Image: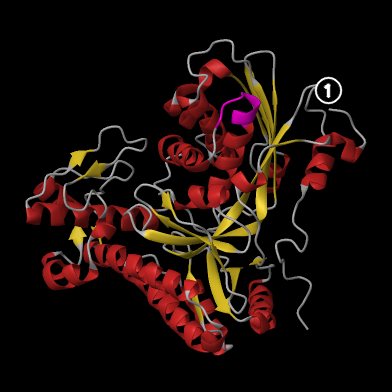
């Protein structure tokens, strides 16, 4: 019998009625003015973590848990944010600022520099993007905004709570300001906010999955920069669950940034070895560098070519000072080289090229799934999951807690398990059959008991932002007028 203490995060996720009730409990919105509602779910990184920034293919699923953003236009030039749930983490719960102060990314970063205010970078950064790049840019008559936030998506677990926060905020505020923003354009805007304002060196897979994904599907995306394929329905014999390792992780963490920097160092070395010029790409929404052979995307290098021609030419490890002395220029706008740090260059390049192929293989196996070959397919998928998991460790992104959860999943008879997202902790994805659900819950129950706290167990799925749409908040559900 599985304990009810296991947080299936939660058994009933937030819905519109719960958002209405929360809004009704605060004297925040003005009566008689429409309130626009957007919802952005978390994502489960099934395959491809850390190849979005090297131009690889990724496979992303969506969770039921989400961030809700309710937005109302104001008649003055102020922006007010209210995030009641922030208090439970010891964070600042509200902001009130003039619009004129939100057009400079550096000013926003400085304003939200402490841990308690850091979440403000993502939301105020969304305002910044709309002011600078939206159709209202330069319009001094735009008026202000009130934004109310509610979430059941836990932070620092590797399920893209920050991307969901940005996407939900952008969608709701753009709707309130009558700015069309959806699809890849919305995902790119959210990536800009994370890269430029929040200082997170992320690629675009999280944002694109959250915008374009569908319930019970995996979204294939070729991150060059964002080329989605039709969502792939998860076969009935294949189940995926997420289990929190209880080791926090972040895309602004040292391990993630070191692995990312190592990949770009390797790319720069390969281009130098091949005599390829690396130049800024003109007109790119997100700053990047490119070349004439691989178009700036390390994952375009074929595994066979890497193994036969390039692997042994790359240093296994390289000190930052040696790289800067030999190559001077670091071609990643969102990480810096620490002269005193060691970087796993060869492993990072190997991961970029091999993970891309692994993702393609998983996509093909799921797309050709047949009930008669279910066990064979699951065995193959499980093996690929394990290869991916161990490749994380080679890049310095491993975590003992995640290794232990993978070991327990295999011991329990599940076909596979792997680390997700940026690595170095966070959520482990468990691969199994429908009848394996109790085994997965059993692993979560024991893990919770051992850690003296509930381990979040993610099951189920939901539609992404575009499929949900933007709605008028129906305050009559709470017997109130808006």
Quarter in which the C terminus is drawn = top right
Find out whether residue 177 is within the magenta segment: yes
The magenta stretch spans residue 252: no
* Residue 13 spot, x, y in % from top left: 74, 56
> Where 145 sits versus 336, above or below?
above
Q: Is residue 48 above or below residue 482?
A: below
Q: How many marks?
A: 1
Residue where numbered disc 1 is placed:
31
For residue 138, above or below residue 304: above
Q: Is 449 left or right of 208, judged from the image as shown?
A: right
Q: Residue 306 location, x and y as percent?
A: 18, 68
Q: Residue at x 20, y 54 (%)?
A: 267
The answer to which of 225 and 479 lies nearer the viewer is 225
Q: In this view, which residue lies farthest toward the top?
A: 141
Residue at the spot x=83%, y=22% of the render? Answer: 31
Looking at the rendering, the stretch of residues picked out in magenta corresponds to 173-180
Q: Give residue 251's position: percent from left, percent from top.
A: 44, 52
> Does residue 297 lie above or below 8 as drawn?
above
Q: Is residue 262 left or right of residue 110?
A: left
Which residue corresponds to the image point at 40% horizontal and 48% vertical from the top-left?
A: 226
- Residue 426 coordinates in the image, percent (x, y): 52, 63
Can residue 103 be seen in the rendering of this structure? no
> Is residue 130 visible to us here?
yes
Scheme of colours in the image: secondary structure
On screen, residue 30 versus residue 95, left or right, reads right
Locate the N terminus by quadrant. Answer: bottom right
- Hey, which quadrant is residue 115 in on the image? top right
Image quadrant assignment for residue 48: bottom left
Judge the density around disc 1: few (<14), some (14-19), many (≥20) Cα neighbours within 10 Å: few
Residue furthest out toward the right: 479
**Residue drawn at point x = 75 percent, y = 79 percent:** 2
- Asked which secondary structure carries label 1, the reply is loop
């Amino acid at each position: 019998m599985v304990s009810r203490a296991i947080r299936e995060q939660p058994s009933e996720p937030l819905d519109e009625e719960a958002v209405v009730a929360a809004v009704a409990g605060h004297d925040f919105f003005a009566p008689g003015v429409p309130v626009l509602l957007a919802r952005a779910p978390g994502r489960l990184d099934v395959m491809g973590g850390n190849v979005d920034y090297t131009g690889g293919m990724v496979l992303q699923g969506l969770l039921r848990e989400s961030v809700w953003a309710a937005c109302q236009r104001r008649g003055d030039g102020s922006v007010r944010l209210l995030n009641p749930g922030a208090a439970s983490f010891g964070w600042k719960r509200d902001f009130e600022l003039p619009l004129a102060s939100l057009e400079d990314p550096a000013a926003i970063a400085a304003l939200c520099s402490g841990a308690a205010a850091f979440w403000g970078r993502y939301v105020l950064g969304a305002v910044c993007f709309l002011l600078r790049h939206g159709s209202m840019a330069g319009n001094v008559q735009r008026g202000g905004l009130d934004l109310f936030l509610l979430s059941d998506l836990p932070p620092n677990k590797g399920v893209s709570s920050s991307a969901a926060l940005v996407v939900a905020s952008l969608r709701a505020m753009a709707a309130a300001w009558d700015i069309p923003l959806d699809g890849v354009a919305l995902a790119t805007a959210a990536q800009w906010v994370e890269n430029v304002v929040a200082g997170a060196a992320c690629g675009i897979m999280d944002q694109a999955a959250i915008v374009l994904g569908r319930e019970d599907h995996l979204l294939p995306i070729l991150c060059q920069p964002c080329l989605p394929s039709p969502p792939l329905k998860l076969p009935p014999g294949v189940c995926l669950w997420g289990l929190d390792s209880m080791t926090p992780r972040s895309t602004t963490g040292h391990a993630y940034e070191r692995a990312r920097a190592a990949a770009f160092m390797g790319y720069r070395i390969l281009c130098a070895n091949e005599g390829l010029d690396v130049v800024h790409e003109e007109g790119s929404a997100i700053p990047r560098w490119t070349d004439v052979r691989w178009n700036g995307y390390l994952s375009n290098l074929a595994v066979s070519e890497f193994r036969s021609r390039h692997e042994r030419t790359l240093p296994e490890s390289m000190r930052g000072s040696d790289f800067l002395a030999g190559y001077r220029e670091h071609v990643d706008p969102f990480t810096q080289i620490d002269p005193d740090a060691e970087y796993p260059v060869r492993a990072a390049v190997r991961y970029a090229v091999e993970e891309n192929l692994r993702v393609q293989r998983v996509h093909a196996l799921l797309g050709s799934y047949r009930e008669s070959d279910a066990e064979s397919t699951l065995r193959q998928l499980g093996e690929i999951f394990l290869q991916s998991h161990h490749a994380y460790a080679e890049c310095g992104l491993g975590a003992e807690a995640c290794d232990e959860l993978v070991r327990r999943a295999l011991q329990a008879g599940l076909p596979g398990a792997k680390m997700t997202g940026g690595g170095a902790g966070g959520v482990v994805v468990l691969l199994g059959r429908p009848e394996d659900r109790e085994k997965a819950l059993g692993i979560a129950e024991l893990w919770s008991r051992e850690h003296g706290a509930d381990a979040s167990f993610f099951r189920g799925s939901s539609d992404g932002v575009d499929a949900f749409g933007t709605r008028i908040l129906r305050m009559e559900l709470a017997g109130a007028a808006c």
